[in-house]
Image (cartoon, rainbow, N blue to C red):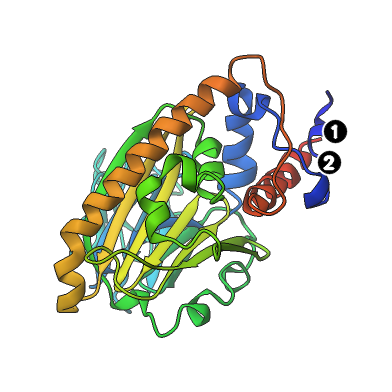
């Protein structure tokens, strides 16, 4: 079937899942790095790692090395972590209170605003002007204690992508939560398999018996917006795990999840390692509320249980997609609207290459 047919957008009631080849054919990851990850806002750091002038974070975004630094005016800058001399790294690890940025290859030094300040032993180079050399910038934005970057020259405005989230979760203030720990999982599935699984509660009664007792499946609902979707449910029967209130599961296209329960934020970042492997980073943040702190151990153990269940089913699905026996199945309009929404955004990205 031609790419144009795979990329057609159908109404939810008529929709099929994305074709299996997008999960099993290695060619698509190159396109996705360019048309999906490099053109979107990517979660890169937490503000707690970038509090003072000179604090800096290194990361990999869409396969590109990126450096984020707090400058002397307490503003954030983000650059390609690539020296203008011979492509050495400006920084190889996170750091604190740096006065300047020094390339680890040949010692060229840059200000916290990315301007070359000095170049070792370059006095004999004709027509060499330090003042004309600047690290290439990328877009950076700080929101609710999280730091995002975008590589595209003109990305979708950040406010348009995240519009209404902070207001919807009030009085929860994500920026008031402190980082607790990171869990990292390497999973034998395409990055999209993991996200598809996250985006629907259809599998809850069958894959997550424990979570099904905590979330009210009858009241479980999905809301769709331009660049994100929200799954939410009242919490119940969860004494010592989440507390009273609601669970909000936000997915921000293309690979960011914000899982919010009373007093806790869990961010997930899904990073492709290949067409059939991905990394999932779980970062946990909590308020200092004593009642919340008393639940941390139980909540993290419960999260580990859910994650093990998700890993198991996602790895089975990847094998099914690669089996050659499956192409694309019908979506459930009531339970899989989030999958439809995500996959249509992907179809739009794929179609740009035709």
Mark 1 residue element: helix
Q: Residue at x 50, y 48 (%)?
A: 198
Q: Is residue 46 left or right of residue 334?
A: left
Q: Is residue 146 visible?
A: yes
Location of residue 295 by image quarter: bottom left
Q: Residue at x 63, y 53 (%)?
A: 338
Q: Residue at x 83, y 23 (%)?
A: 1
The reply to whether discs 1 and 2 touch (Cβ–Cβ < 8 Å) is yes
Residue at image mark 1: 5
- Residues 32 and 24: in front is 24
Q: Is residue 138 visible?
A: no
**Would you call the spot at circle 1 few (<14 residues within 10 Å), some (14-19), or many (20 or more)?**
few
Q: Quadrant of the C terminus?
A: top right
Mark 2 residue element: loop
Q: Position of residue 163 (x, y in %)?
A: 59, 74
Q: Is residue 38 left or right of residue 348?
A: left
Where residue 8 is drawn, which disc sits there? 2
Q: Position of residue 314 (x, y in %)?
A: 47, 33
Q: Furthest residue to the top?
A: 324
Q: Is residue 18 left or right of residue 259?
A: right
Q: Position of residue 329 (x, y in %)?
A: 71, 32
Q: Position of residue 21 (x, y in %)?
A: 67, 24
Count of numbered circles on the image: 2
Q: Is residue 323 left or right of residue 98?
A: right
Location of residue 49 by image quarter: bottom left
- Residues 109 and 140: in front is 140
**Would you call the spot at circle 2 few (<14 residues within 10 Å), some (14-19), or many (20 or more)?**
few
């Amino acid at each position: 079937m031609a790419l144009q047919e795979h990329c057609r957008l159908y109404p939810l009631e008529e929709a099929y899942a994305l074709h299996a080849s997008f999960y099993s054919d290695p060619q698509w990851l190159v396109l996705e790095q360019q048309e999906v990850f490099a053109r979107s806002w990517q979660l890169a750091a937490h503000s707690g790692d970038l509090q003072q002038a000179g604090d800096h974070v290194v990361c990999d975004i869409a396969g590109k090395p990126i450096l984020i630094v707090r400058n002397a005016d307490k503003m954030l800058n983000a650059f390609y972590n690539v020296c203008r001399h011979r492509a050495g790294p400006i920084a190889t690890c996170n750091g604190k209170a740096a006065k300047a940025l020094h390339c680890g290859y040949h010692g060229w030094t840059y200000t916290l605003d990315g301007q070359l300040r000095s170049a070792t032993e370059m006095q004999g180079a004709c027509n060499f002007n330090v003042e004309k050399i600047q690290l290439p910038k990328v877009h950076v934005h700080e929101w609710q204690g999280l730091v995002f970057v975008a590589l595209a020259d003109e990305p979708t405005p950040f406010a348009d992508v995240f519009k209404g989230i902070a207001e919807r979760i009030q009085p929860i203030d994500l920026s008031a939560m402190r980082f607790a720990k990171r869990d990292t999982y390497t999973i034998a599935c395409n990055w999209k398999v993991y996200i598809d699984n996250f985006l629907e509660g259809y599998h809850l009664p069958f894959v997550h018996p424990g979570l099904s007792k905590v979330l009210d499946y009858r009241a479980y609902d999905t809301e769709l917006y331009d660049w994100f979707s929200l799954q939410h449910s009242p919490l119940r029967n969860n004494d010592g795990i989440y507390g009273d209130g609601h669970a909000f599961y936000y997915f921000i296209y293309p690979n960011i999840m914000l899982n919010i329960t009373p007093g806790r934020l869990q961010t997930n970042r899904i990073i492709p390692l290949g067409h059939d492997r991905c990394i999932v980073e779980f970062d946990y943040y909590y308020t200092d509320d004593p009642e919340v702190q008393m639940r941390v151990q139980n909540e993290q153990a419960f999260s580990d249980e859910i994650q093990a269940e998700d890993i198991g089913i996602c790895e089975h699905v990847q094998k099914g997609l690669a089996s050659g026996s499956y192409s694309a199945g019908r979506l459930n309009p009531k339970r899989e609207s989030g999958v439809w929404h995500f996959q249509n955004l992907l179809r739009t990205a794929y179609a740009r290459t035709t």
